[in-house]
Each structure stands twice: as structure tokens, then as C-alpha cells.
Amino acid sequence: MNNPLSAQNKDLNNLKDPRLEVVSSFDKSQPIGVSVSSDNRVFVSFPKREPYTMGLAEIVNGKRTAFPSAKNGEDPILKQTDFINVQDIYVDTKDVLWVLDSKPASNSSIFGKGSSDEKDGGKFTLYGIDLADQNSVSKYVFEDLDKEKSALNDVRVDTEKHMAYFSDPGQAGIVVLDLKTGKTRTVLKNSRFTKADPKVVLSYQGKEMRDAKGNPFKSNVNGIALTKDNKWFYFKPINAHHLYRIETQYLVDRELSDKELISKVEDMGEVGITHGLVADKEGNIYLTTSLDYSIRRLTPEGSLEMVVQDSRLIWPDSLGVGSDGYLYFSCAQMQLLPNWNNGEDRVEYPFQVYRVKVL
């Protein structure tokens, strides 16, 4: 399959898929994380960028509603003011909504400035909200994480082993959090599977994605996926072409050396530049790409299939699969933000979350 480094075909700008549906619009608020519960409740997270309204929302009747919400006249235990910068969300197989509140130190952030206080490094919190009782909340604060280097990006939770897995582009590794003890380990650090390829530069219609200083956009390991049976963990950098996976039994094994763990990684082949990943109940792995406005899926048999391609899919990012057979996803429009366009805002408002039938 051809995987070009740049999206320069003008015909791509006029692609329309009639199956694509708008779930909700957010004007100038940028949606990042998306996840869906077993009964098809749709949740969306927003980073703390102006205009900032809320960090976490549930989509109700096509509109975003702050979540957790006030019930029976009482405020929820977890409030919007508790969030610093919600980066990612994930509903696990037991309908717990995990919220990654991640603000890296400035020298570790790949999406602009992180914490303004570099001496204190970054600030990271993981919340687990039981969707059956929004006031049942667990909290982890990553006391043993290297906050000067870390930039926790995406989270997936293994309900069988009671572990959480994170992509950490700042450390170019995978962080494994033991939900019973609160202790973390960083594995596959600076390996060829987790580091960005410096030769891969994202380019759109002939223009490379660079900041005001000429530095190209670059992300080490970023998108991750966990199969519903908790067996396989998939991962890759944005600036790389191959997708990798490893069995979670090895990922959580403290007895394995780095060399032994690396030997357990499987190369799933070339999939091109991708951003978000998610697995469905059938074992398909969905991958978003901004270069040609598309979402593909890798089947359990190893085939790479086109799911949807539409010019409205500008940096399709985070995804969730509902029991209703729809794939829900955000479009972050990262390459159109001012910091990648010499200060010019080229975003096509409103920001939106979409869905398309896949099962």
C-alpha cells in the first residue's frame, strides 16, 4: 500500500463520504479525547486552550454537557476546576471513564508549551470515574514519574491485570501504572519502536509542518490501543511508518530485562503516518491519519482497509467504538493551528466530533 509522506493531491480537498455524521460541534473549543461507554454515552475532552469552557464533557442530545455533572442539587466530587489540562480519556471494559489530566514541562511538550513552572516539571493526574456512580472516583498522581521529561499522552486500562498503559512521547517510552500500588515503570524507552524517525516530516499540500523557528512537528510514541480481551497492546510514534504490538503479559512482567522485552515486540508492518488508535470488539485496530483525511483499520488477519476518507477529517485524532456499531472520533486540526502557520489561525471552525458506521 502506498503511504506518502505528504498530502499534496488537490483532489483530496473535495472528498465527501455521505456516511459521515456530525455528532456535535464546539465552535472554537478544540476536542481532543473521545471515548464511548458500553451503552453509547459519548465523552469528549478539551485541552486548556482559549476559548476554554470545560475540560471534560458528555454529549447529550448533540450538545456538550460538563461531566461530572451536578445531580440532586449537589456538586460532584470531581469538578471542572480540578482539571489542569485534560489530554485523553478512555472508557474501559467495566465502564470506568479514565481521565488523563496531563500538562508536561515545557521542554517535554510536543503540542506547544507545557507547565510554566519548569522547576516543578509537569503535572499529571489520572482519574477513574465509575459511570454507574460519578462520585465514585479513583485518583493517581504519578509520584515516581520523571516529570521533567515525561509527557503522558494517551491512556488505556487493562481491567484484567489492573494496569494502565500510557504513551509517553517525552520519554519515548511506554509507562505502565500498577492501579493497585500506584507505582509506575517506563519500558521500551528510546527504542526503535518508540522513537520518532527524524527523516519523517509531515507535509500538507507542499508545506512542511514547522514552527516559527523552523522546527518540524515531531512526536515519539503517541497513539496506542488495547484489545478488548486485554491481550494485545498496539503503539507507534506519529513520525514513523510501522505499527507495533506486544502482549500485555510481557509488558507487565517486571522480571523481563529491556533486551528481553524488546524481543517480544512484533512489527505489524507499514501503516503510514497515524495519530490516534483504538481497538473494537472484533479485534480491528483503527488508525487515523491527517495526510489524506482518512481512517483505516488493520484487521486481525493483517489486512489494512480504508474505513472512511473525507476532506472534513482534518487531523482525525482520538476514537471510540460504540456498541451501536459506530466509530466516534475528534478532528483536532493540529496542522492548521497558529503555532504551525507563522501565527496565522487557519482552523476551519467549528471544531467537530464525527461518527461513521463500521460494524
Image (cartoon, rainbow, N blue to C red):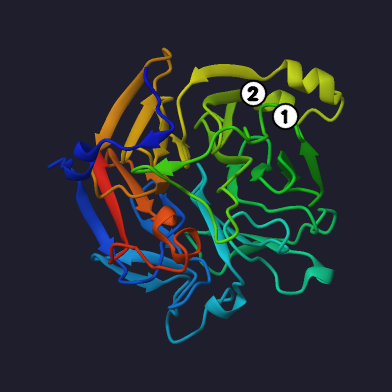
Give the structural element (helix, strand or loop) at label 2: strand
Image quadrant where residue 135 sits: bottom right
Image quadrant where residue 84 sits: bottom right
Question: Is residue 358 toward the left or the right of residue 92 in the image?
Answer: left
Q: Residue at x 24, y 42 (%)?
A: 356
Image quadrant where residue 20 sits: top left
Q: Which mark is residue 246?
A: 2
Q: Is residue 59 visible?
A: yes
Q: Residue at x 75, y 61 (%)?
A: 141
- Label 2 near label 1: C-beta < 8 Å? yes
The extreme left residue here reads 18
Q: Is residue 231 visible?
A: no
In percent of width and height, residue 322 lies at 34, 43
Q: Which mark is residue 251?
A: 1
Query: Residues under labels 1 and 2: Cα distance?
Result: 7 Å
Residue type (three-letter) at the residue carrying disc 2:
Ile
Question: Looking at this view, is 339 or 303 the one in front?
Answer: 339
In percent of width and height, residue 179 lies at 72, 48
The answer to whether 176 is drawn above or below residue 233 in the figure is: below
Mark 2 Cα shell of 10 Å, populated few (<14), some (14-19), many (≥20)? some
Question: Looking at this view, is 146 or 207 the one in front?
Answer: 207
In percent of width and height, residue 262 lies at 75, 21
The answer to whether 220 is drawn above or below residue 267 in the figure is: below
Q: Quadrant of the N terminus?
A: top left
In percent of width and height, residue 123 lies at 72, 65
Question: Is residue 132 toward the left or the right of residue 358 in the image?
Answer: right
Mark 1 Cα shell of 10 Å, populated few (<14), some (14-19), many (≥20)? many
The answer to whether 236 is drawn above or below residue 349 in the figure is: above
